Image: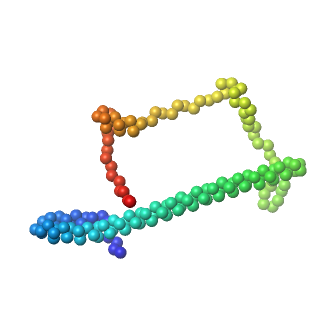
Amino acid sequence: MSNITLYEIAREYRADLEKLAELDLDEKAFADTLESLGGELQVKAQNTIAFTQHLEAVAASIKEAEQKMAHRRRVIEKKVERIKSYVLQVMQANDIQRIECPHFVLSIAKNPPSVLIEDERQIPQDYFTSPPPPPPQIDKTLIKKAIQDGFEVPGAKLTQGYRLNIK
């Protein structure tokens, strides 16, 4: 496999097309020559896309592994919390305030006070906050439809892009 890039092949292809256009060939010879010129470009493009498909598969497997690892992390974090809660309950049940060992010290401490809402309907309105309204969002679908219907929308225009379809 050569290390020539798709850009270089395309540049050579265009140069060969220009040379071919200058030659005085019959229709069949022109078609045969044109077909032979595109071969290397097509093979390189196919190999390049095959490589991108490989990369997409690698990315998908990494994403799946990330999801599995995140799930595993959450399971372990919950297990840690359950174990800590268990040790706290045992220490409280046995009226033990402190346990010392060479690696760490366990002690029971009070949490800062927190508010427990028993019935939200009874809370006076003074204690409610309302979030600020979200800023208005541009609706590109409405703008697109308006422009397609012949209306001018200041500050916006339709653009035509391209994408590569791989089937």
Residue 86 falls left or right of residue 125: right
Frontmost residue, 70 versus 57? 57
Q: Is residue 97 visible?
A: no
Residue 110 falls left or right of residue 5: right
Q: How is the image coloured?
A: rainbow
99, above or below 111, in the image: below
Q: Quadrant of residue 26?
A: bottom left
Q: Where does the image place residue 100, in percent across and percent down from the top left?
A: 83, 56
Q: How many dots with numbers?
A: 0
At x 57%, y 61%, the residue is: 65
At x 32%, y 41%, the residue is: 158
121, above or below 114, in the image: above
Q: Where does the image place residue 70, in percent across and percent down from the top left?
A: 61, 56
Q: Quadrant of the C terminus?
A: bottom left
At x 81%, y 53%, the residue is: 87
Q: Quadrant of residue 77?
A: bottom right
Q: Is residue 87 visible?
A: yes
Residue 95 falls left or right of residue 72: right
Q: Where does the image place residue 32, in percent across and percent down from the top left?
A: 20, 70
127, above or below 166, in the image: above
Q: Quadrant of the N terminus?
A: bottom left
Q: Where does the image place residue 150, in percent across and percent down from the top left?
A: 29, 34
At x 23%, y 68%, the residue is: 35
Q: Residue furthest bottom?
A: 1
